[in-house]
Image (tube, helix red, strand yellow):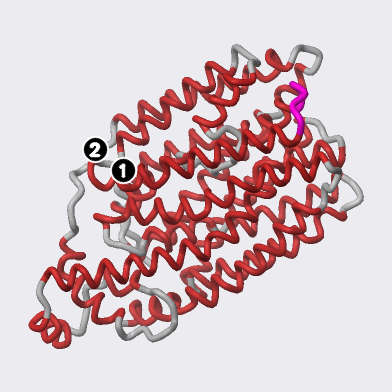
Amino acid sequence: MNTVPMHPVVKQLLAVRALRSIGQGAMVVDLTLYLKDLHWSGAAIGGVTSAAGLVGAALILVVGILSDRIGRKPFLLIYEALTTISAVVASFTTLGLVLILAIVLAGFGRGQSGAAGPFSPAEQALLARHVARPDRGRVFSLNNAVGFIGMAIGSLLGGLPALLRQTPPLVAYRPVFWTVAALSMVCVLVISRIREEKIRSLPSEESTGQQGLQNSRQIDGTGPVPIVTIEQGQGQGASTGAFAAQSSPQDEERQIRKQENRSLLTLALVNVLNGLAVGLTGPMMAYWFSLRYGASTAQIGATLSISFLLTGVFSIVSGRMASRIGMVKSVTWMRVLGSAAMLVLPFMPNFALASVLFVVRNAVNRGTQGNRTALGASLTRDKRRGLATSINALSMRLPASIGPTVTGYLFDADLLSLPLILTAVLQLINAGIYQRVFGAYDRKAQVGAEG
């Protein structure tokens, strides 16, 4: 099977993802443990993590809308600059207010698999612009894999404070903050070399919008599936011509936007349960391992490193599965397996067994992220893709921002297993809803490929 060579912008964005993810991998290990060493309570740690999520959620929609109008590159530069400044400042002080501002602005500790935090809609839209629709599952899965492999390397770096355990926390964790700052500065250099074209409607979108509208009306009660129909450029010439004769361009645009908006709203509602589940455990797992088993930063770093490395492998596997059994079905089955593993995890008697199960769970569950992102990025035409990815991300981040606060209080109440069980149950329910709502996409994609 022949593949189209990657556009230079795609290669540059993959490089940025790799560099950025190393710093994020280190911080997902160390942030909560650093605050724990500074004697912050579980509620305080969860609270500041939630605050970072809420601020990020507020920025996401603004970034998506503005990036559609003025371009995506400036927002990526802003994100790297904020990360650099926050890391440098946090490396020189333990003042609570300063740390809160740094964590909230940079989103430290949230484990975003190399994504650009609240500025990720701009990044995803820029990536999707330079990847043809049939290749998006593969390229977005590769992008996801690169991020997790980078986080695996960063998680090993996150074990460094264990080597400086006799020193004050600020000194022990300072090399980690400096590493994050240095990597972000390199990202600035790479992004500055990206050449971004002016955003406009692509010819393929303008010529196929009528067909997409006509085809979308044939979908009766199976959920929104504009992804295939809007961007295909083949067939149904007679019906397209007849429809065009009856409708003005303004009417056609209005109907296409209506279908796109309906699809975006449906995806957002489906994402809510998954976002809440991710927020309950994602940013707090390093802290959980420390409380439950007394694990050190080195032990947790090694576990998370293996987990992220295997997740990168499963991201590539997920991309291949999407081409064989369908993008949606691959997400559903891998999420069911991951949820089952999470349900058993809190009952493991020791750190070694818990680590093995966590590694497997994380790999199969988070390995679907590339396909899920590709689906969200394909719901609209390019000129609205920033908005689409913003809504997709917002619907995940907003409920996810609540989770760490809830988990922090539960940890303080010595209810260590409950957040993990809730995560498993919520994601099992979400898997069923996801398949029910978007299962039609796989069928339409197959028909489109055959046509």
Q: Mark 1 and mark 2 in contact (Cβ < 8 Å)?
A: yes
Q: Which mark is residue 195?
A: 2
What x and y, as percent, mark residue 325?
52, 75
Q: Is residue 395 above or below residue 261?
A: above
Give the total of numbered labels: 2
In the image, residue 134 lies in the stretch drawn in magenta: no
What x and y, as percent, mark residue 417?
82, 52
Dot 2 or dot 1, earlier in sequence = 1
- Pointer 1 residue: 9
Where on the picture, by quarter, is residue 379?
A: bottom left
What x and y, as percent, mark residue 445?
39, 76
Report the amino acid beneath label 2.
Arg
The structure residue drawn at horizontal position 73% and vertical position 17%, both measured from the top left corner, is 169
Assign the N terminus to one quadrant of the image.
bottom left
Question: Which stretch did the figure color magenta?
Answer: 36-41
Q: Is residue 225 above or below residue 279?
A: below
Where on the picture, by quarter, is residue 215?
A: bottom left
The structure residue drawn at horizontal position 20% and vertical position 71%, both measured from the top left corner, is 209
The majority secondary structure of the magenta stretch comes to: loop
Is residue 276 or residue 349 the one in the foreground? 276
Local SS, label 1 = helix
Is residue 291 or residue 317 the one in the foreground? 291
The structure residue drawn at horizontal position 68% and vertical position 34%, both measured from the top left corner, is 29
The structure residue drawn at horizontal position 68% and vertical position 49%, both measured from the top left corner, is 280
Q: CA distance from mark 2 to mark 1?
A: 7 Å
Q: Is residue 190 left or right of residue 298?
A: left
Local SS, label 2 = loop
Report the amino acid beneath label 1.
Val
Label 1 neighbour load within 10 Å: few <14, some 14-19, many 20+: some
Q: Is residue 234 left or right of residue 259?
A: left
* Residue at the right extreme of this rendering: 349
Q: Is residue 350 left or right of residue 173?
A: right
